[in-house]
Structure formats: C-alpha cells, structure tokens
Image (spheres, helix red, strand yellow):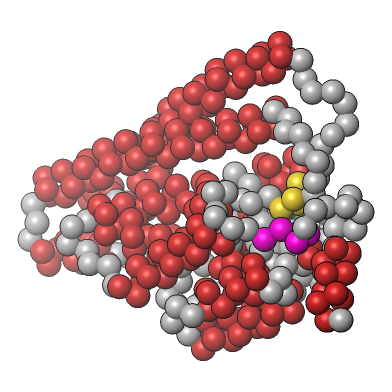
Amino acid sequence: MPWPWPLVSWLVIKKRSRTGVFWASVFSLAYFGFYRQGCVCSIGAIQNVTLALFEQSYVIPLAVLAFFILPLVFTLFFGRTFCAGVCPFGAMQDLVAFRPQKTDPRLNAILGVIPYIYLGLAVLYAATGTDFIICRYDPFVGIFRFNATFGMFVFAGTLLISGIFIARPYCRYLCPYGVLLNWVSRVSWRHITITPTECIQCRLCEESCPYDAIDMPVTDGNPEERLVTTRKLILICLLVPFFAILGGWTGSRLHETLAGDSPKVRLAKTLADPVKSRHQPETFEITAYKSSGKPLAQVYDDARSVLRQFYFGGWILGCFIGLVFGIILAGRLLTRYRTDYTPNRGACYSCARCVDYCPVEKNGLVKMES
C-alpha cells in the first residue's frame, strides 16, 4: 500500500496543510495500527534487513523490504513525512499531544543518544541471530492487537500519558528507525519550511513546535575569533576518536553480558553447571539438545563462536555509540549563525504545525482566496 507516502508528502510540501496531516494521521492509526495490527512495521523491519544481510539462508519478504525502504526514499526527497502522517506509532503519540511542554536542550541531547543505542543493539542481536528485540519490547503493537502483556501495557500507557506533556516521547527518545530517518532527512531534496517566502522575524512560530525542532536565529555577538574556532576544531578532532575508542573498548568488555540472551550461550552455561540445571525446570533449549544427539563439545564450540561475534560486535557497537556521543558534543561546542527560523531537518517530523503560526502563510492564503 504505497500511496500514503506521496499523499502525505503532497499535503506537507505542496499544500502545507496541518489539517490534512491530522486526518492522514487518524487514518494511519486506524488502518496501519488497529486494522493491520501494526504489521508490517518499518521500525521492526530493521531487524529483518539486518538478518538477511548476515544470514544467507534467511529470505526477507518483499513487503517487509518495501516498508523498510519506501519511508527512507520519501524522506530523501521530502523530509520525514512518513513520521508526519503514515507511521501509526507516531500518529498515536501525535494525537495525544494536548499540552506539550518545552524540554531542556541538554536533557534532549542526553536522551537523544538512547535511540542510537537501541538501534545498535537491535542490529547486533539480529545480525547474530539472537533475538528481534524491537519486536519483543515494542510498546504499541500489543495494544493494536489487544494482546499486550501487563508490563508492555503499562509501558505503552506511560508513554502515551507522558506524551500529553512531552510530545512523541517514543519517537524522540527511543525509535531506532527514527535515527535512519534523521540521517536521510538532513540531505532531503525538499523539506517543509515555516514560511513559504522570506521570514519577517515576527517570532510567532517560536513556541509552535512541540518537538523542539525549530532552529532559532543566532545573530547576537560577533563571530568567534579564528583562534577560538581553531581550538574548538582541534578539541573536537581529539575528542571524537577518543570517545569512539573508549566506547569500543567498553562494548567489547560487555560482550559476555550482551551474549547472555543467545540460546546457544544459555544452553552451554546450563550444561556446564549440571548441579544448578538439576534444580531448575527443563528449558526448551535443553529439551531440543537432548533430542538432537549433538555432542557436548559442539555445543561449547557454538557458544564460543557466538561470544566471538559479540566481542567484535561489541567493539563496533561501542565505537558507534562513542562516535555519536562525540558528534553530539561537537555540535554543542560549535556555533552556527542563522538569520531565520528554520526547521531542523533531522529532528523535524514535518507535522506542519508551525505553518499555521506564520502570518506570511496566512496572508498568502488570503490573497489566493481573494
């Protein structure tokens, strides 16, 4: 069902209609959410694509591949219009954002690292064939299917209640697919703008975005001296690789803990401690092992192979998180001077709320109507 993406992109870029985006969100929540029960899910498709890349025997369904690629393609052309009115997870949160409050920029920066960690872990666990953790800990699909566990129901309810005051908490501080959309949206061909023409600095849009995705003008003071800028760049060039190496080392030290969820590792640990295993109920892994006739040495070899995968994967994951942390810190050190109010292309969800606050937009519509 590819048509919602171009429709919402047209509503955002061409029509600049918040009303249209709102009703598209209602439809997406009803159809993709409750009717389709949240599946196929672009967020969870990250794991299918990862497993297909690392496991030759796994064949990814075309529908899953399409739901993974299409939002990225439309984001490349039109910004995050998928988040605006197609994603049912985003729609559910967007529709309950009744009294959104501003959050501290420093807290936003810290919490903004969590989706990168979640993405890295999801890729690591899928690549090693360990688990699909996005599906396991998804807070909304259980609600769409009316079969959520009590814990997941409480988790989803907490997100929705907090979403009344902190707009889109899952999208901003958890969604791993949002990381990919953020990257692609930064280089999008076209993107929604607050004003259709020149900004008149009326400041009416300043508080309009509940997602803190509007970059304010930065014109006060003189540009930094070249020496100060040079020192900051040198510091950044030192800090970014330092955090990447430190993160990689930390991730490698955690590889045994991360591999603890692997069925092969769990089986080897259980068989290595027969006294403990006798006092515990027989697990599915133990039952399957007894019926397979596999030698005990092979079980240990399989577990060591998984541990090696997590060791190298831990290095890659840690380097990735350290690099992200270093880049975020670098962004806070550098000052970019701007003269207009502009949407932050990475963080903007293209919801079109801000356009209703722009008098240039309203005057333009009045002229068109007259």
Outermost residue toward the bottom in this view? 35
Q: Is residue 134 above or below residue 119?
A: below
Q: Residue at x 92, y 54 (%)?
A: 202
Q: Residue at x 77, y 58 (%)?
A: 197
Q: Residue at x 69, y 74 (%)?
A: 15
Write down the region rendered in magenta. Answer: 192-196
The quadrant in which the C terminus is found is bottom right
Residue 274 coordinates in the image, percent (x, y): 24, 50
Q: Is residue 122 above or below residue 322?
A: below
Q: What kind of secondary structure does the magenta stretch mostly adopt?
A: loop
Q: Is residue 41 left or right of residue 146?
A: left
Q: Is residue 300 left or right of residue 150?
A: left
Examine the image and state in which quarter residue 195 appears.
bottom right
Q: Is residue 199 above or below residue 145?
A: above
Q: Is residue 13 left or right of residue 17?
A: left
Q: Which of the pair 338/110 is nearer the observer?
A: 338
